[in-house]
Image (cartoon, rainbow, N blue to C red):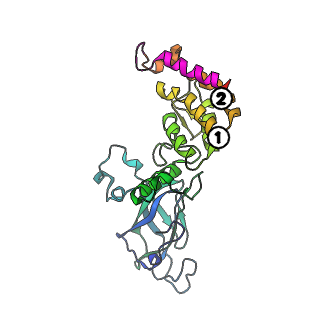
């Protein structure tokens, strides 16, 4: 199905109580989808002259990233996460009145179950969704490295689409479940972004958010939550914290914005736990002689400091 308009034959399908309709939007989307229903004997969504008495319509709309996510029962779907992550809402609406999810969802497929309505059945006369992303709707051209190989070009397209859908108010680790900013994920997403969308402002925003949500001892948190308000998560991952400095350097080199790099340089220095405080010790299992080599950290930070000279 086209992301901007319903399929041509969709309004001709009649659904009765107990029946279901499956829709494929053609690509993975992050958006707030909207649907509109009428009684099966109505001519249009806005004109009910000559039709039967209007009856309220009750439907369950479930959204999935794969068809298996639209099974008859969440219990039938093999999962390790809670069933509440299987997106689905029930709607009561008068015929012709659009129904819309309260917040954005991540999906490609939809299932409409008719729970109650007129005996004549109902029809879906409108169904729309578009890609929502701070990167825009259009994907960049495939990487030149893909050449004319259709498999490589398809892999590149899937990767670009995945990155685009994760580029919302921040670089989300996933637009469906966590919907939060992780420092480790951000480094990889930012590097891919420099070679594709080149959205430097979004990376800059994320760097400042991590700086603003640092712990009281200056150590950078592993993740940041957007809702209900900006705050650093309780997770502390030492190697994630160490990535802040290299990520800031990557940003400065890619964007040429050394002013921001200088502004956030103190945060980068604090995020390297070369002398862990007792609070940092309490969050992690850093041990002398462990996987984090303190001398290597110092050399890396000193090299950057000299290079900024």
Say whether residue 92 is visible.
yes
Q: In this rendering, would 259 be left or right of 168?
A: right
Quarter placement of the C terminus: top right
Nearest to N terminus: mark 1 or mark 2? 1
**Location of residue 15 in the rendering, given as x and y in whole percent from the top left corner:** 39, 74
Name the one closer to the observer, 253 or 43.
Answer: 253
Q: Nearer the viewer, residue 139 or 186?
A: 139
Give the total of numbered labels.
Answer: 2
Up-down: is 111 above or below 288?
Answer: below
Could you tell me residue 255's position as x and y percent? 64, 40
Label 2 residue SS: helix
Check whether the beta carbons of the residues at disc 1 and disc 2 lie within 8 A of each other.
no
Residue sitting at x 42%, y 62%: 110
Instruction: Please give the range of residues in magenta.
Output: 287-307
Mark 2 nearby-residue class (10 Å; few <14, some 14–19, many ≥20)? some
Identified at 60% across, 22% down, the residue is: 269
| Residue 157, horizontal then vertical, whole percent | 47, 56
Q: Residues within 10 Å of mark 1 (few under 14, many from 20)?
A: some
Q: In the rendered view, tell whether residue 265 sits above or below residue 28.
A: above
| Disc number for residue 255 | 1
The residue depicted at 63 percent of the width and 43 percent of the height is 200
Q: Which of the labelled discs sits on residue 264, or is there none?
A: 2
Secondary structure state at the residue bearing disc 1 = helix
Find out whether residue 297 is within the magenta segment.
Answer: yes
| Residue 250, image quadrant | top right
């Amino acid at each position: 199905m086209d992301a901007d308009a319903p399929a041509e034959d969709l309004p001709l399908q009649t659904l009765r109580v107990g029946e279901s309709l499956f829709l494929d939007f053609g690509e993975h989307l992050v958006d707030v989808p909207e649907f509109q229903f009428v009684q099966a004997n109505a001519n249009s969504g806005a004109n009910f002259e000559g039709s039967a008495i209007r009856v309220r319509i009750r439907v369950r709309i479930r959204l999935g990233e794969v068809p298996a996510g639209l099974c008859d029962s969440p219990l039938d779907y093999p999962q390790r996460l809670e069933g509440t992550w299987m997106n689905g809402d029930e709607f009561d609406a008068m015929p012709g009145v659009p129904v819309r999810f309260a917040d954005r969802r991540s999906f490609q497929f939809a299932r409409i179950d008719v729970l109650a309505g007129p005996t004549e059945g109902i029809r879906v006369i409108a169904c729309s969704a578009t890609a929502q992303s701070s990167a825009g709707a259009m994907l960049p051209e495939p990487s030149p490295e893909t050449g004319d190989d259709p498999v490589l070009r398809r892999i590149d397209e899937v990767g670009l689409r995945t990155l685009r859908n994760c580029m919302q108010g921040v670089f989300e680790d996933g637009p469906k479940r966590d919907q939060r900013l992780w420092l480790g994920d951000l480094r990889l997403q930012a590097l891919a972004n420099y070679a594709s969308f080149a959205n430097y402002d979004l990376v800059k925003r994320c760097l400042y958010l991590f700086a603003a949500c640092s712990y009281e001892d200056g150590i950078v948190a592993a993740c940041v939550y957007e809702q209900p308000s900006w705050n650093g998560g309780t997770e502390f991952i030492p190697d994630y914290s160490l990535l802040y400095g290299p990520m800031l350097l990557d940003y400065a080199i890619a964007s040429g914005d050394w002013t921001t790099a200088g502004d956030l340089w103190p945060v980068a220095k604090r995020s390297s736990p070369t002398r862990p405080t007792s609070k940092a010790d309490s969050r992690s299992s850093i041990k002398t002689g462990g996987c984090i080599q303190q001398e290597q950290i110092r050399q890396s930070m000193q090299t950057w400091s000299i290079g900024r000279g």
